Amino acid sequence: MLAEYNPKVVEAAWYSWWEKKGFFHPDVDAVNSGKRKAYTMVIPPPNVTGALHLGHALMLSIEDAISRWRRMSGYEMLWLPGVDHAGIATQSVVEKQIWKKEKKTRHDYGREAFVKKVWDWKGEYGEKIIH
């Protein structure tokens, strides 16, 4: 046994089995026929306001435990991930960054240049959230 948990080693064998068993897809027919109750949890996505941190891991660990418990309790469980929804929060972070680094506001850039800065920020941090 390895001294530490290595998800690539441990879960590699399980993942294809989970997919074959359909564990990532709830049985809608079982819910519609009344055989099973539905339980759905939509994951509030992390915002593109910076790098992911331990708080995100804690939140997802709790949601994972709840969804597994519901599934083991006989529910058809759907744990649905989302993607960023915080355009205003992201804009605010970018505005603070350009003020801190350059002492400029979004008005100094104009709409098109500022929107490009926001997309650049999203490009830097958004992929980290997806992966």
Image (tube, grey):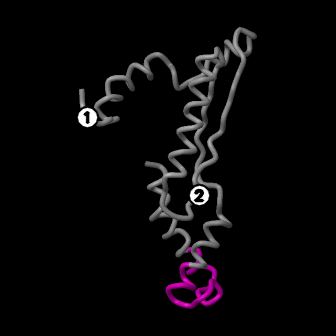
Q: Position of residue 123 (x, y in %)?
A: 47, 64
Mark before the other along the chain sequence, 1 or 2: 1
Q: CA distance from mark 1 to mark 2?
A: 34 Å
Residue drawn at the location 60% of the way across and 28% of the way down: 67
Looking at the image, residue 12 sits to the left or right of residue 47; the answer is: left
Name the residue that disc number 2 marks: 47
Q: Which residues are magenta?
A: 97-115
Q: Nearer the viewer, residue 58 or 44?
A: 58
Q: Is 1 positioned to the left or the right of 18 in the image?
A: left
The residue at the point 25 percent across, 34 percent down is 3
**In percent of the image, x 63 and y 80: which residue is there?**
111
Is 106 located above or below residue 19 in the figure? below
Q: Nearer the viewer, residue 66 or 98?
A: 66
Q: Position of residue 39 (x, y in %)?
A: 69, 26
Disc 1: which residue? 3
Give coordinates of residue 12: x percent, y percent: 32, 29
Q: Residues within 10 Å of mark 2 (few under 14, many from 20)?
A: some
